[in-house]
Image (cartoon, rainbow, N blue to C red):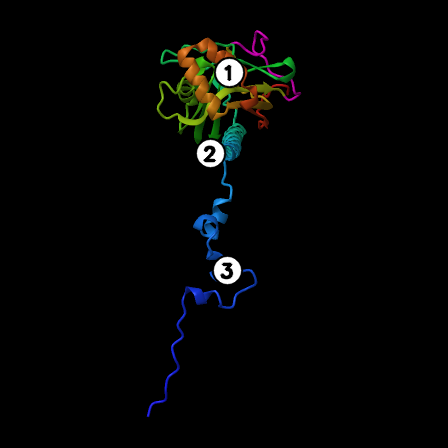
Amino acid sequence: MFAPSKPFMNLNVGQASRLPSAAGASPFGRFAAGAGGTPALLCSRAGQRAFSLLEIMVAVALLALIIVGLLAMFYQVQRAFRSGTAQVDVMEGGRAATSLIVRETQEAIAVQLEPITNMAVVLPVVDLNNNPAPATGSQQALPGGDTRQNFLRDFFFVSKMNDEWVGTAYRISNAVSGVGTLYRLVERQTTNNPWFFASNFAIATPYNNTNFRRVMDGVVHFTVHLYDANGWIILPANNAYPSDLGYAVTNGMLPAYVDVELAILEPTPLEKFRYRYDANPVQAGTYLANQAARTHVFRQRVPIRPAPADYGQ
């Protein structure tokens, strides 16, 4: 009742050679045995060349040179960025300080009393005993063989707002090293006798008055020149310029113009200068003399309101 089934095909290794295959190809394809019984695939891989030790060393050396070049470029960019940031900070601080001095100096007035100093440019002091700093300032070499002479001076003046007398002082601290810190003091007082107020204010320094506030660090040059209405500089009694001890105007006198000069050293050379000064002041002075390129100078002329007895009138 069952149909006879077809006989099973019995294949053996001998019969496998009769299977259809590509011309000249082994019935086992790419896995056919090669010489010595080794598969052909393994024979082809064994015939490929790998990198030699010399080639690897050359590749590593080239990669190292590329990395060193990239690191050097990154360092230079970072250094330029920091230098640019420091210059921007110094420029902004110097402009702000100069603008502050200019704005307040324009309000100076003549008190009209003989013993009272209306405006003065004097040597800074270096201690509580009011010992003055050296009159000769530092020098800095400029391109072309020229030099710039730096001076550190204190500057103060008197003004009045309504019935209130106002004393404003800009004084240098630590001026003995050639690089100082600029401080500012503003005191106000309502009085009918400004002589006592002006006298006490004229001797106030950062060493004996805690009301001084720091304005700018790294100051290598700060001075103010007084001019009359004809544009001639006002000299002290001994006609010395620049003055060894400074000069002042009293009574009803005021200059027609003042020139405010301020020079500031960048933070990085300032730190190096202070480190050298602690170890060797002479070496620090030599270092400062070569930092003109990293010293920023600000200068501005300020007109003063006419007083009843101005110079040149």
- Quadrant in which the C terminus appears: top right
Task: Decide if residue 103 is on the left or right side of residue 163.
Answer: right
Q: Earlier in the sequence, mark 1 or mark 2?
A: 2
- Residue pointed to by mark 1: 288
Residue drawn at (45%, 52%) of the image:
39
- Residue pointed to by mark 3: 26
Q: Height in image: 166 above or below 30?
A: above
User: Gap between marks 3 and 2, in whole Å?
Assistant: 116 Å
Identify residue type, mark 2: Asn
User: Gap between marks 1 and 2, in whole Å?
Assistant: 45 Å
- Residue pointed to by mark 2: 162
User: Gap between marks 3 and 1, in whole Å?
Assistant: 90 Å
Q: Are marks 3 and 2 in contact (CB under 8 Å)?
A: no
- Quadrant in which the N terminus appears: bottom left
Q: Position of residue 177 (x, y in %)?
A: 45, 14
Q: Are marks 3 and 1 in contact (CB under 8 Å)?
A: no
The magenta segment? 229-244
Residue drawn at (56%, 9%) of the image:
237
Callout 2 secondary element: loop
Q: Position of residue 268 (x, y in %)?
A: 47, 24
Q: Height in image: 15 above or below 313?
A: below
What main secondary structure does the magenta stretch of the protein show?
Answer: loop
Identify residue type, mark 3: Ser
Q: Position of residue 273 (x, y in %)?
A: 46, 17
- Residue 151 makes an appearance in the image: no
Residue drawn at (44%, 10%) of the image:
281
Q: Is residue 50 magenta?
A: no
Q: Nearer the viewer, mark 3 or mark 1?
A: 3
Q: Residue furthest top?
A: 238
Q: Position of residue 183 (x, y in %)?
A: 43, 24
